[in-house]
């Protein structure tokens, strides 16, 4: 049977893609940010995931105001890096896993989640930056990727509770897939940041770290945070953190932390990163 062996959470700040692509990941500014991913890169080499279900949000690359799916799953064979205005990133194409993706789509829809099925799309920094942060500079990504796009750009986004429940449903779907696969679920975006208006540049260290705390252990309190709290405490873009809850919901009742990283600043944002393991109670958090 396929199994979810780990969850990874990470910001997907576009500037990190630029820094990586320009070889600036060890300079004075970016060095402390990238250093927090060194542990994860070595860990991923040992873990060797077959498939990553990568939860991210599109930034008007595949979707625009003409169509705004709340949840969309990529069931295609290949996804090219998107041109976000300065040419596509010089990173490998993303190779999908259509068999597992279609299985998950069917399972989720029959589980009463209204998924949009995408067979062709380009993927932007929301998806490619986390791959660079976890795997570094590689000729091809070392695993297959199932993109799962969430609307956190246009109101109304899904609630944290709905995202957590979607993660639980993804876990059920993966567990019912007959092929022996090592599957990870990644939740990306955040942490606290606002890109416009009088509060542009807002960063809330205390709230961010409390959120990181809440991802660990057996509490499900984060699923009940209302939209207005994200907006008030973390800025207009902090709502991206509901995507982390899909990953957390997929890990089961309890999750143990293997690695944690938090750094300010990263551009005008706080960067957060967690590696979690499903835990039956014997792990250390």
Image: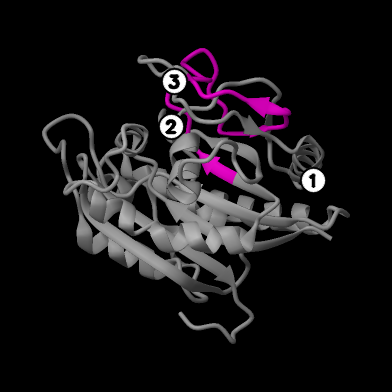
Q: Nearer the viewer, mark 3 or mark 2?
A: 2
- Disc 3 to disc 1, C-alpha distance: 28 Å
Q: Quadrant of residue 206?
A: bottom left
In the picture, measured across the screen, residue 48 lies left or right of residue 101, that is: left
Q: Residues within 10 Å of mark 1 (few under 14, many from 20)?
A: some
Residue picked out by circle 3: 60
**Left or right: 8 as drawn, with respect to 266:** right
Mark before the other along the chain sequence, 3 or 1: 3
How far from the left and from the top, in percent, is residue 129? 43, 38
Q: Residue at x 50, y 61 (%)?
A: 42
Residue beneath label 1, please?
107
Q: Which residue is mark 2?
A: 125
Judged by its main secondary structure, the magenta piece is: loop
Query: How many C-alpha atoms fall within 10 Å of the one at disc 2: few (<14), some, or many (≥20)?
Result: many
For the C terminus, the quadrant is bottom left
Q: Is residue 273 magenta?
A: no
The kind of secondary structure element at disc 3 is: loop
Looking at the rendering, the stretch of residues picked out in magenta corresponds to 54-82
Q: Which of pointers 2 and 1 indicates the residue nearer the eye?
A: 2
Picture quadrant where residue 167 is located: bottom right
For the N terminus, the quadrant is bottom right
- Tell me which residue sits at (21%, 46%) in the image: 27
The secondary element bearing badge 2 is classed as helix
């Amino acid at each position: 049977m396929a199994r979810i062996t780990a969850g990874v959470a990470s910001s997907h700040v576009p500037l990190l893609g630029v820094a990586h692509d320009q070889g600036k990941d060890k300079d004075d500014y970016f060095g402390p940010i990238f250093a927090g991913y060194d542990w994860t890169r070595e860990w991923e080499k040992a873990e060797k995931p077959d498939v990553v279900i990568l939860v991210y949000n599109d930034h008007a690359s595949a979707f625009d105001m003409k169509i705004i799916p709340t949840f969309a799953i990529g069931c295609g064979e290949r996804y090219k890096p998107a041109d976000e205005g300065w040419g596509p990133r010089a990173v490998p194409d993303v190779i999908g896993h259509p068999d597992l993706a279609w299985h998950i789509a069917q399972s989720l829809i029959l589980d009463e989640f209204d998924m949009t099925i995408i067979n062709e799309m380009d993927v932007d920094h929301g998806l490619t930056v986390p791959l660079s942060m976890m795997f570094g500079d590689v000729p091809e990504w070392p695993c297959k990727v199932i993109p799962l796009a969430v609307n956190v750009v246009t109101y109304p986004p899904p609630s944290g509770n709905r995202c957590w429940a979607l993660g639980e449903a993804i876990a059920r779907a993966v567990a019912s897939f007959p092929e022996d696969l090592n599957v990870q679920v990644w939740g990306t975006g955040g942490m606290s940041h606002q890109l416009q208006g009088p509060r542009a540049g807002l960063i809330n260290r205390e709230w961010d770290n409390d959120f990181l705390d809440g991802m660990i252990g057996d509490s499900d309190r984060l699923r009940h945070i209302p939209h207005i709290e994200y907006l008030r405490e973390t800025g207009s873009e902090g709502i991206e953190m509901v995507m982390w809850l899909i990953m957390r919901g997929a890990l089961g009742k309890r999750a143990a932390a293997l690695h944690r990283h938090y750094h300010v600043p990263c551009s005008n944002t706080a960067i957060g990163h967690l590696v979690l393991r499903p835990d039956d109670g014997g792990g250390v958090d």
